[in-house]
Image: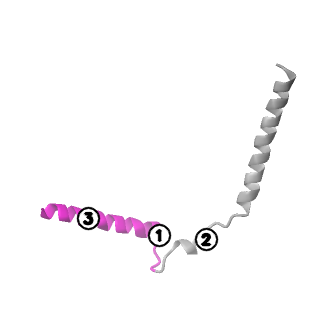
Amino acid sequence: MDGYMVWLIILLVLGVVLSNLAVLKYSAKMKWPSKTSLTDVSGKDKKTASNDEDAERESTDKSDHAKR
C-alpha cells in the first residue's frame, strides 16, 4: 500500500471520529420534551388521543359504508 493511501485512510477515520464527537456534543445541548408536555389538557397522551380519533373515524367510515 502506498504511503498516501495510508494517510488518506487515517485522515478519513479521524474525520469520522471528530464529526461524531461534534454531533454528540451538539445533541447533548438539545432540549427533549418532558412527559408533561406530551399530555394534553384531558390527561390523555397525544399518541393515545390521536389513536382514539383514528379509531372513531374508521368506525364512522365503516358505518357509513354499511348504510349504502
Which quadrant holds residue 68? bottom left
Magenta stretch: give its range: 42-68
Q: Distance between the residues labelled 1 and 2?
A: 13 Å
Q: Where does label 2 land, which residue?
A: 34
Residue placed furthest toward the top: 1
The type of residue carrying mark 2 is Ser
Using residue 10 as the reference point, say whether residue 40 is left or right of it: left
* Badge 3: residue crowd in 10 Å (few <14, some 14–19, many ≥20): few
Residue placed furthest toward the front: 4
Residue 54 belongs to the span the image colors magenta: yes
Which quadrant holds residue 1? top right
Please tell me which residue is depicted at 32% across the width and 64% down the height of the picture. Answer: 55
Q: Where does label 1 land, which residue?
A: 46
Residue placed furthest toward the left: 68
Taken as a whole, is the magenta stretch helix, strand or loop?
Answer: helix
Q: Position of residue 64 (x, y in %)?
A: 19, 65
SS under mark 2: loop
